Amino acid sequence: MRSATVAIVGRPNVGKSTLFNRIVGGRQAIVDDRPGVTRDRNFAAADWAGHRFWLIDTGGWSSVDDDPIHAGIRKQITIALAEADVVVLVVDVKDGVHPADREVADLLRPQRDRVVVAANKADEPARETGHYEFHSLGLGDPQAVSAATGRGSGDLLDRIVAILPTESDTRSEGPQIQVAVLGRPNVGKSSLVNRLLGEERVLVSPEAGTTRDAIDSPLRYHGETLNFIDTAGLRKRSKVEDEIEFYSTVRTERAVERADVCVVVVDAAVGVHAQDLKIAQRAWDRGRGLLVVVTKWDLIEGKDPTTAVRGEREVKERARFLRAVPFLYVSAVTGQRARKVLDTILAVARERDRRIPTAEVNRVLEGLVARQQPPQRSGREVKLYYGSQIGERPPTFALIANEPDAIPESYRRFLENGFREAWGFSGIPIRIKLRRRRKTRR
């Protein structure tokens, strides 16, 4: 059984994203006074009075036909309506009934039983009766709300959950693997996500920076739920001049914090840029699983079986931590190796949760020390006694030594490489903590 879905729709700048944030209890959707800020469908889990449901924020409905962005937004809204069990049409009591409101109402009227009209911005006494004129839309009694202050939001949610389908499973859907899709603007992140999901869930356009919010899209695959977080492209801070670009960058960084696995998308025609390495390093340093997906591979002319190998070797010379990271070469257009991306995400997520028995840790540690002793301190022998795994996500090992401060970073890397050689941990950073052995009391 699936969770119910509630879609928020309406024309630009009526407060859809503000209402979205009010319901989910945070600031997941970007809010700005300028119309058209929200372009994609933005997913988030919400609950009210014991009812759990998915909430979808959508871009603003526009009648402009010759603008590909607006055409794409209209298509996204149509998809959201097809997915939704309940639709919330947000209108603005300040402006009254707008022609675009009537257009959306005409689209919704055949399914009016699952539609609630939210007459937003009713935050002043003078506007307490302003919602009545929206009866003319033919969608039932409008609900006066103020998304900014929360006025009327409880009554609105009561009406929403009252018409949620009773057969929907409102229980927790269980654990999810959070997958952040990262990369510079216009490298094909959204196209890759759409290919993996099997539908155009995220808006795609040749215009760089089309995705601004971090968009959540769940997918069931091999018995697991993968939640894809498609993000706006990260840029150097000096180039983030627009306030919306800034908040997009903040949300991308938050996506890394949420993620179990990060997928760094690289344009095959452009190659790995210094900014790509910074993005990958950020995810790695924060203990996230990592894989690099080189997309648009179908556009590379004259490639041979060694092209990928040579390019990958050069990149790993520039960033040594990437030697432990899988590289995949795909085409979002043709679907080449798309399934391999899903399989690798699952494999990396499993590696992040692995536990190594203490006896096995000490067997491998003993072999590594026998192969190469730690550098010795003048006047005193440096010894490693034993170790054990003390954590996962990422796997973390505590090694007990008599002089932990005397063990250099180069030897720590030697141990890390030895552990990786023994146990794999493909796409996963390994943490090693050196600790001093406690003195026993007599």
Image (cartoon, grey):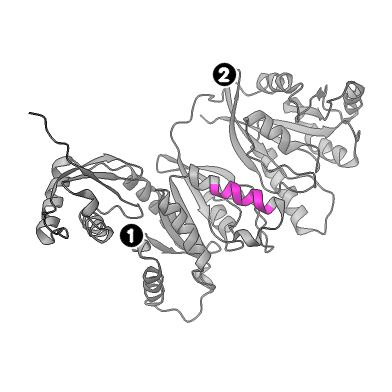
- The answer to which image quadrant residue 210 occupies is bottom right
Residue 127 location (% of width, % of height): 90, 24
Q: Can you give x and y, in whole percent of width and height, for residue 95 in the image? A: 91, 36
Say which amino acid is labelled 1.
Answer: Ala
Mark 1–mark 2 Cα distance, whole angstroms, equals 44 Å
- The residue pinned by badge 2 equals 50
Magenta range: 245-253
Residue ID at (56%, 23%): 167
Question: Which residue reaches farthest left?
Answer: 442
Q: In this view, does 322 lie above or below 121?
A: below
Question: In terms of secondary structure, where does tag 1 sit?
Answer: helix
Closer to us: 251 or 354: 251
**Left or right of 153 on screen, residue 122:** right
Instruction: Please say whether residue 212 is visible from this viewpoint.
Output: no
Q: Which amino acid does label 2 sit on?
A: Gly
Relative side of 184 to 103, left or right: left
Q: Residue furthest front?
A: 379
Q: Is residue 269 magenta?
A: no
